[in-house]
Image (spheres, rainbow, N blue to C red):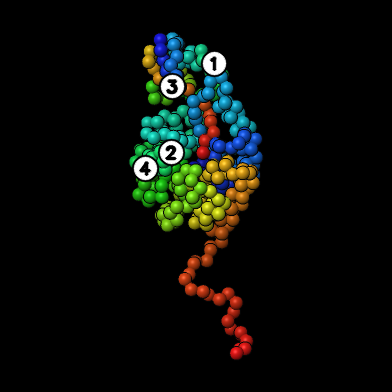
Amino acid sequence: MLKLYDHTVESRLLLGTALYPSPAIMADAMRAARCDIVTVSLRRESGAARAGQDFWGFIRDLGIRVLPNTAGCHTVKEAVTTAQMAREVFATSWVKLEVINDADTLQPDVFGLVEAARILADDGFQVFPYCTEDLGVAERLVEAGCEVLMPWGAPIGSARGLNNVYGLRSLRAHFPDIPLIVDAGLGLPSHAAAAMELGYDAVLLNTAVAKAGDPAMMADAFARAVEAGRLAYAADPLEPRDMAAPSTPVLGKAFLE
Amino acid sequence: MSIIVNGEPHDLAPSSLAALLTDLGYGEAIVATALNGDFVPAEARDETPVAPGDRIEILAPMQGG
């Protein structure tokens, strides 16, 4: 079980809701992922079409808890206002806080992130900050009131996997009691398994499932990889070593020269 | 008067932010509002006046990652 703030969930795979070929395929993927939490966003309502109303009705019917994001926000002010609007619309104090620095890498603006996290935590939000693996920034976020951290694996949508395994391992060692979720940049189930084998509590991804040829099948693959990685971590894996160590007993081997 | 709603100019003179939502057909819709970059909670829309040149954002749930 995974405890995030005051809420406990079974699944350690969080999915985004964007970029699917259709709502029906998205729903299939969510079922295949067996996920308990999905991310959502807020955008300008599109005229008479009222696409947002339809989407929200669809998500609510699925009965899955939502984690609203502040995607695309480049300033503290934008992110805080968006979070406030999301809290009202989605009726949750959870927020996946994104304050973006660079349009090409979608790298977090860690200074703005810490400032926004403090404002929102003080206002009663339960903040899930999209951050880097930087230990100093992570400490500031925890001081600001974040009880979950979500470091990137790689730039959003890049499918590169874990760019900085050392940094992620250090973060895990540094914060043994804070739920850590690798958010963004995963492309393959093996990336998710690797994150879980490092001791991460969960992974959050969107594009790798939504843009796969068969999103539901890929969601199932990620769900199994997350479970396998978690089991492997819990089973206390063997440390790598440089030299061979025979697995078949040497003692009792026949002398056949 | 001219106001900006979701980035588009509109020639409207609503008595309040709530009235603007009704005029634009958002009466029953689940939306969040901001006025000139500041969040306006649903319960404050009735008492929130709209002035010429105001920028209003009307946001709705949408897909996100």
Among the 4 quarters of the image, the one containing residue A84: top left
Q: Chain of mark 3?
A: B
- Determine contact: label 4, label 1, CB under 8 Å: no
At label 4, the amino acid type is Val
Cα distance in 3D space between marks 2 and 4: 9 Å
For discs 1 and 3, the disc positioned in front in the rendered view = 3
Pointer 1 residue: B25
Check disc 4: other Cα within 10 Å, few if <14, some if 14-19, many if 20+.
many
- Give the secondary structure at mark 2: loop
**Label 3 sits on what residue type?**
Gly
| Residue drawn at x 65%, y 40% as measured from the top left | A28
Q: Earlier in the sequence, mark 1 or mark 3?
A: 3
Q: Secondary structure at mark 1?
A: loop
Chain letter for mark 4, please: A
Three-letter amino acid code at disc 2? Glu
Residue shown at the point (45%, 11%) measured from the top left? B12
Q: What residue lies at 58% left-to-right and 29% top-to-bottom?
A: A56
Identify residue type, mark 1: Gly
The residue that disc 2 covers is: A98
The residue carrying mark 3 is B7
- The residue lying toward the viewer, choosing from A142 and B30, is B30
